[in-house]
Image (cartoon, rainbow, N blue to C red):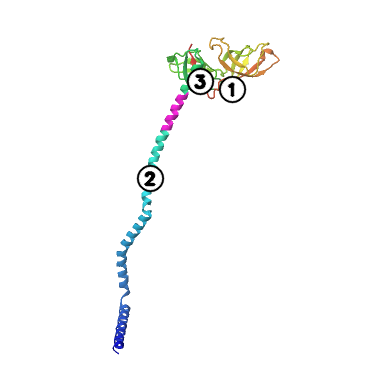
Amino acid sequence: MNKNKRSGIIGIIITIIILTALVVITNVDVSKFSYLEGIAQKLVMPIQNGLTYLKNKIAGNNTFFEDINNLKSENEELKKQNEELSKSLSEIGIIKAENKTLREYANLSDQYTKYVTVPAYIIDRDLSNLSSTMVINVGSREGVGANMPVVSAEGVVGHVISVTETTAKVQPITDSSSSISAIMSISRDNLIVKGELGNNNQLKATYISADADLVLNDDVETSGLGGIYPKGLKIGKLTEIVEAQNITEKYAIIEPAVDFSKLETVLVIIK
């Protein structure tokens, strides 16, 4: 009996509490909840942002902007290194070119040991409709004078026609005004080799004797006559013989030993 009475009292108390809570809830102003919610958000947001930053830091996302700054610095450093490398490569290129020129001079000197020579390189070319000349970087200061032969590793280039203190003008054998007394290497026939107007790739041999026994691909050399070129310098190679009804009009085509389009370094024979 006492137990049933106690259970009933507890049930009544619980019912009263539930009803009281319902009454309070139904009478509370909802706007106050919104106000309280705003305060809660202000309190919670910094915590939430802190948690988000901590999450990103753990995940490595916060390094994005730092990486961009690092990349900019690295890019500037790479640009600087690239400029220095380009400069170094340019200097290496100049040194290699100078070494190449020195080697060419050495090879040239070895070929012409019986002559006193001065090394030079071409600094200008004058190609007009009437003539073709070139300028080299040595002159009277180095002992160079007019009518001195100019040669390359392949053979005869031409001869000096005028000088200044530091430069010399050279008339190549391909110039239309050039004329060289020559001799064939095998048959030993004499002929005159002339340049052709506007053609650096071939020479014309004239004054060929009636009984000359020319051989194709035979070498053509300087004869030593004429007072400019010493004997035995290579002029070129005989590539074609052109017959004519009049024997005095017979001529031959000679391919120069020197490739004038690629010519850079030469020697001037002083003695």
The three-letter code of the residue at mark 1 reads: Asn
Left or right side of 223 for 115:
left
The stretch drawn in magenta includes residue 213 = no
- Give the magenta part as a residue range: 88-100
Location of the N terminus by quadrant is: bottom left
Residue situated in front as seen by the camera: 225 or 184: 184
The three-letter code of the residue at mark 3 reads: Met
Q: What residue is shown with label 3?
A: 134
Residue 95 falls in image quadrant: top left
- Mark 1–mark 3 Cα distance, whole angstroms, equals 16 Å
Q: What residue is shown with label 1?
A: 201
**Residue 200 spot, x, y in % from top left:** 57, 22
What residue do we see at 60% from left, 16% from top?
219
Q: How many marks?
A: 3
Left or right side of 270 for 68:
left
Q: Secondary structure under badge 3?
A: strand
The secondary structure that most of the magenta stretch takes on is: helix
**Residue 87 spot, x, y in % from top left:** 41, 33
Q: What residue is shown with label 2?
A: 72
- Furthest toward the bottom, the residue is 1
The three-letter code of the residue at mark 2 reads: Lys
Which numbered disc, 2 or 3, marks the residue closer to the eye?
2
Residue situated in front as seen by the camera: 99 or 250: 99
Q: Using the rendered image of the protein, determine whether residue 177 is visible from the camera's viewpoint.
A: no
What residue do we see at 36% from left, 55% from top?
58
**Residue 70 spot, x, y in % from top left:** 37, 46
Q: State whether residue 102 is above or below residue 211.
A: below
- Mark 2–mark 3 Cα distance, whole angstroms, equals 52 Å
Assess disc 3: are there few (<14), some (14-19) or many (≥20) residues with their C-alpha within 10 Å of its C-alpha: some
